[in-house]
Amino acid sequence: MGDMGEEEKQELREIWTLFSELSCRARNVNDDSIATSELPSLMRALGQNPSDTDIQALYGKADPMNSGVVHYNTFLGMANGLIENREQEITEAFRVFDREGKGSIHTAELRHVMTNLGEKFDDIEVDEMVREAGVKGADGEVHYEEFTKKMCAQY
């Protein structure tokens, strides 16, 4: 598990820039920052749905000195951590279904997990994910760590 790819960084930068321009204009500054209070909206724009607890933790990490602003480099480091945490959580969820501890689950189990738990996907979306990830073994098994890495990078 690791850092974002260049495409992800570029997308993050584009969204950050939109927020920063509006935030800086509202605060009458020009320093590529956002107001700390805008973090929840930024996270939602990035497809996250932070709880109140998550938001408080974000505030503490992004602005430990309570300055009221967050700069891009600080946020980029946080975003890398969020992606890594998301990958770990998803991998752990799949590991529950890996009864033999071999690092893979059958595509039927994957389909069940992806269509019934958490963010629910339909069968067509799951088929597309498996095909795009290209991690299906000859035995009909999906190597879930590799699958998770590829899916987190794409979605």
Image: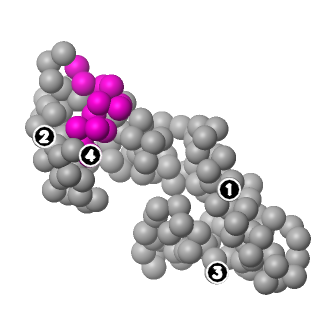
Q: Which residue is mark 2?
A: 109
Q: Which residue is mark 1?
A: 14
The secondary structure that most of the magenta stretch takes on is helix
Q: Is residue 60 magenta?
A: no
Check if mark 2's residue and mark 1's residue have beta carbons within 8 Å.
no
Q: Which residue is mark 4?
A: 125
Q: What's the magenta region?
A: 125-137
Circle number at residue 37: 3
Amino acid, disc 2: Glu
Q: Is residue 126 magenta?
A: yes
Q: Earlier in the sequence, mark 3 or mark 2?
A: 3
How far apart are the two marked residues, 2 and 1, measured between alpha carbons? 37 Å
Neighbor class of circle 2 (other Cα within 10 Å; few <14, some 14-19, many 20+) is: some
How far apart are the two marked residues, 3 and 4, measured between alpha carbons? 35 Å
Q: Earlier in the sequence, mark 3 or mark 4?
A: 3
How far apart are the two marked residues, 3 and 2, measured between alpha carbons? 41 Å
Q: Percent from the top left, x then y, of residue 124?
A: 21, 44
> Along the line of sight, which residue is nearer the eye, 133 or 40?
133
The residue tagged with tag 1: helix, strand or loop?
helix
Quarter-wise, where is residue 130 in the image?
Answer: top left
Please give left or right for residue 47 compared with residue 92 in the image.
right
Q: Percent from the top left, x then y, of residue 58?
A: 57, 69
How far apart are the two marked residues, 1 and 4, measured between alpha carbons? 27 Å
Q: Percent from the top left, x then y, of residue 88?
A: 39, 45
Check if mark 2's residue and mark 4's residue have beta carbons within 8 Å.
no
Check if mark 3's residue and mark 2's residue have beta carbons within 8 Å.
no
Q: Residue at x 62, y 50 (%)?
A: 11
Amino acid, disc 3: Ser
Neighbor class of circle 3 (other Cα within 10 Å; few <14, some 14-19, many 20+) is: few
> Along the line of sight, which residue is nearer the eye, 132 or 113?
132
